[in-house]
Amino acid sequence: MTDRNKGKRRSSRWFGTTDKDGFIHRSWMKNQGLPDDAFDGRPVIGICNTWSELTPCNAHFRQLAEYIKRGVWEAGGFPLEFPVMSLGETMLRPTAMLFRNLASMDVEESIRANPIDGVVLMVGCDKTTPALMMGAASCDLPAICLSGGPMLNGKYRGQDIGSGTSVWQFSEAVRAGEMTLQDFMAAEAGQSRSAGHCMTMGTASTMASMVESLGMGLPTNAAIPAVDSRRRTLAHMVGRRIVEMVREDLRMSRVLTRAAFENAVRANGAIGGSTNAVVHLLALAGRLGIEFSLDDWDRLGRDVPTIVDLMPSGRFLMEDFYYAGGLPVVLKTLGDTGLLNKDALTVNGRSMWDNVKDAENFNEEVIRPVSRPLVKSGGIAVLRGNLAPNGAIIKPSAATAALMQHRGRAVVFKSIEDYKARIDDPKLDIDETCVMVLQNCGPKGYPGMAEVGNMGLPPKILAKGIKDMVRISDARMSGTAYGTVVLHVAPEAAAGGPLALVRDGDFIELDVAGRRLHLDVPDAELVRRRAGWTPPPPPMTGGYQKLYFDHVLQADQGADLDFLVGCRGAEVGRDSH
Ligand code: FES
């Protein structure tokens, strides 16, 4: 194999000199029992690990990293594992999304500051995947992702239950008086019964699928269960491959092209993926300077049928998806229908089509043929209008068909606390034709754009057997959630967007087919209301939250921090201490 940069690698500037600095760099590393030839100019591979016991979805990563190291040593590389900030979706407050950009800074600076020639990104729980890809993209070294894999199917009373999706169902059943609290508690252990991330097609599984469809992971990366021995084999192969990638100088920017992003958007439609992929891919493209916008999501996803029948849109779970053939089958199907950029380069050095053209579907209930889709048009719809001048999104495959065109009276909640304080009040003036509006939950407003957009319905409406209403906010929603939920309204209320001006009793028109979201209030009245609006104060007067508040971009730009947009490369600037 051609070693395109032997002797010129970054790591040789640390380990390849015979002066005082070379002594320092090698000597201290040798306290870990490393032989002289570890420093002979071989590729140094960083293993960027998001292991944490506070991130249960990634809690098996220390073992997985050992398999990567086997592959690295075997291929003639030198592996060095390092930790970065981990982001546990279920634990972090106020929301893990607040820290995605912070973690990406940790990744970027850790890679650039150290003698790393190529990097394995160990990703799993929702925000860890975009955070690590964004940070590495801003350095643009050879990089490959290894997802941690989903949990085994949840089991409760003989039924399959799915992470998140079943929680929303159970909690609404408790609120409607259809499930006892005792049963609710008993379902917890059965839902999460193995290592791995959420096993519905939530954000983690979606982002693992984005990794594979962007070409950033090896084939089958998305779906192998975390505890299946083939996940460890994949880790071993990733270790081997990153060493070759360094020798080939196959950098991230050669894989993450516009063609790759187009493939990812279409794959997202085909899998019925999470709305969270929208902000994450916009932010990732921004790091690489790729022209890619919210409108691309709408345009590219329009003709894509959802063929994967997984919760929350469908019936099955990730374990079933893997046994059916996994994402390669989906990508092959897209290729067969003219919806795949077949020549897009992937991390194994082959084209996307070479990787997937022989994929076989072993279960046409789980991965349906295009003639029998779960949803005919499965992409993300982008709405615009005077209520969302810079756009808002809705996932039609998770919405109720009868509500996709709707005019209703607004019932406004000023914050999530206001919603929680009033939603159970039997005197709340609301019926099922109303539109629930939630303000101040966007990137600045929450802060961190929390997953609260799928507000639960009032108990008095649930008691009638009604399960869905139109809901509008500047928040996100969990990838495991569902409903006629308009999200990511931009600009957000806290940035002075028109969402801030909506009042109880206003009428709102939603027209998904026409891509329209309209607040039926005269312009002059909106001007009058705006004159009385005051921006909210920052959540904190110092620290990261202040930095975040001052610099976060809106959802239509991926909610990255303005000064992190772009690729800054891997040059350190100074070669000595
Ligand atoms: Fe970690 Fe869902 S909570 S992936």
Image: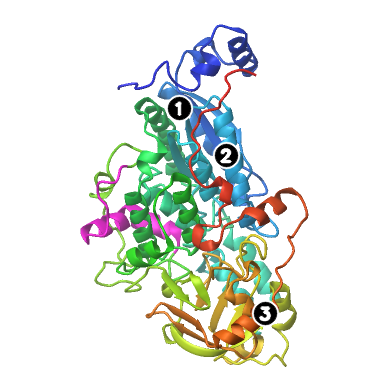
Please state which amino acid type lies under the numbered disc 2.
Val
Label 3 or label 1, whichever comes before in sequence order: 1
Tag on residue 72?
Answer: 1
Left or right: residue 30 compared with residue 545? left
Tell me, yes or no, whether the two marked residues, 3 and 1, touch with CB atoms within 8 Å.
Answer: no
Residue 45 point in image, percent of width and height: 49, 28
Please give the residue where the numbered disc 3 appears in the rendered image.
413
Residue at figure coordinates x 34%, y 55% from the top left: 262
As measured in the structure, the alpha-carbon distance from the residue carrying label 1 to the one carrying label 2 is 20 Å
Q: From which residue to which does the magenta span run?
A: 317-345
Residue at figure coordinates x 39%, y 63% from the top left: 297
Residue count near mark 1 (Cα–Cα under 10 Å), binned few <14, some 14–19, many ≥20: many
Please say whether residue 318 is one of the residues in the magenta stretch. yes
Against 188, residue 513 (above or below) is: below
Q: Choose mark 1 or mark 2, whichever is in front.
A: 2
Tag on residue 97?
Answer: none
Please give the residue where the numbered disc 2 appears in the rendered image.
107
Please say whether residue 480 is one of the residues in the magenta stretch. no
Please state which amino acid type lies under the numbered disc 1.
Val
Give whichever of 558, 244 is nearer the camera: 558
- Numbered disc 2: secondary structure: helix
Quarter of the picture for ligand 1?
bottom right
